[in-house]
Amino acid sequence: MRVGVPREVTPGEKRVPLMADSVKRLAPKKIDVSIERGAGTGSCVSDDEFRAGGATVEDSGDALYASSDVVVRLRLPTVESIARLREGSALVSPLFPLQAQNAPLVRALAERKVTTIAVDMIPRTTVAQMMDVLSSQATIAGYYAVLMAAAALPKFFPMLMTAAGTIAPSRVLILGAGVAGLQAIGTARRLGAVVEAFDVRRVVKEQVESLGARFVEVDSDEDAQTAGGYAKETSEAYKAKQAEAIARHVQKADVVISTALIPGQRAPILVTEDMVKSMRPGSVIVDLAAEQQGNCALTEPGKSIVVHGVNILGELDLPSKVAIHASQMYARNMEKLLLHLCKSDGKDSALHLDPENEITRGCLITHAGDVVHPKVKERL
């Protein structure tokens, strides 16, 4: 079986979904890899390194798509790229198929008779943890968000004892204590900030406190965690109490880093314009939910703006800022996923899609001309 890695063309994207070491580890399982020329440049991996690992370097994307049984990407496919896939081949890629704007991509993949594995739909189970690209890339985003905030804030993060007097530490509020939020807490604490964190899932309180942050609680018995560990929609009564609690802590914060997402929906608005107005001039908001329109009502995805004296950073694709390690982590996820999905007879390997397997069932979206994922099919 041949796996193809095309060069990503999204502006600013520097990552590559498989590294040269990945090629070496996949070879014994009879999985060959082709790389489009220059695909690893942004991650500082040369074509020669890929060749040394055993990969074939194709001069053009057309040649790569034509020869690949499975194409691996780390950005959403476009309708144009789907048309380049061979009928009957497979695509392993982010897809976010439950979002309405991606319905045309799902339909196009089904019509092309492409087997689609959506890496963003991998179940959050212990066994699947090694394949969870959302978690690995969120780790990078949470780390880098704090560095961005520290660079933009006109204050020190740590408390300093100086000849000119004592400098008080900055106060950082993290909204959402998932993978990105927990990494942001740890990074902000290492830089010396006083950190608070809020999450609708009460179960994360212990994790927040173990990192040295204070957990912001809402006076309610409601818990918004799904069986899969994700956040879910809360009641209107809870939202009102939540807004009151967040407003009090946003007003005192020098930095707010928001990470709250609900799968398949617009990111919830947690920071209103009135909350932004209450912050001190020079304060910073880093909105990691900007990919889904943002947790701050004023966020402009892809832009850094100043509103009411507050810096609001809506940067996209933060993992690409740390491209080498982000690519390494993504590649390890892809290795585990490919080995899970493929079966070798000792001479060759091929996709083996077991509908009874929880991981395969969770991320298989289209196959043999049909949309086979029940939730995605219902949405369409």
Image: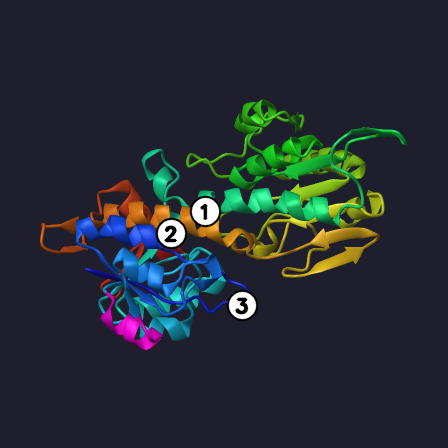
Amino acid type shown at disc 3: Pro
Residue 140 is left or right of residue 86, and the answer is right
Q: Is residue 148 above or below residue 58?
A: above
In the displayed structure image, the side of residue 4 where residue 294 appears, left or right: right
Amino acid at the residue labelled 2: Val
Q: Earlier in the sequence, mark 3 or mark 2?
A: 3
Nearer to the camera, 17 or 242: 17
Residues in magenta, as a range = 58-68
In the picture provided, is 283 more to the left or to the right than 135? right
Q: Residue at x 17, y 54 (%)?
A: 30
Q: For the residue labelled by badge 1, is the local secondary structure a helix, a strand or a loop?
A: helix
Relative image position of residue 379 (x, y in whole percent): 41, 57
Q: Which residue is mark 1?
A: 134
Of marks 3 and 2, the one in the foreground: 3
- Distance between mark 1 and mark 2 Cα atoms: 8 Å
* Mark 2 residue element: helix
The circle drawn on residue 11 is 3
Label 3 sits on a secondary structure element that is loop
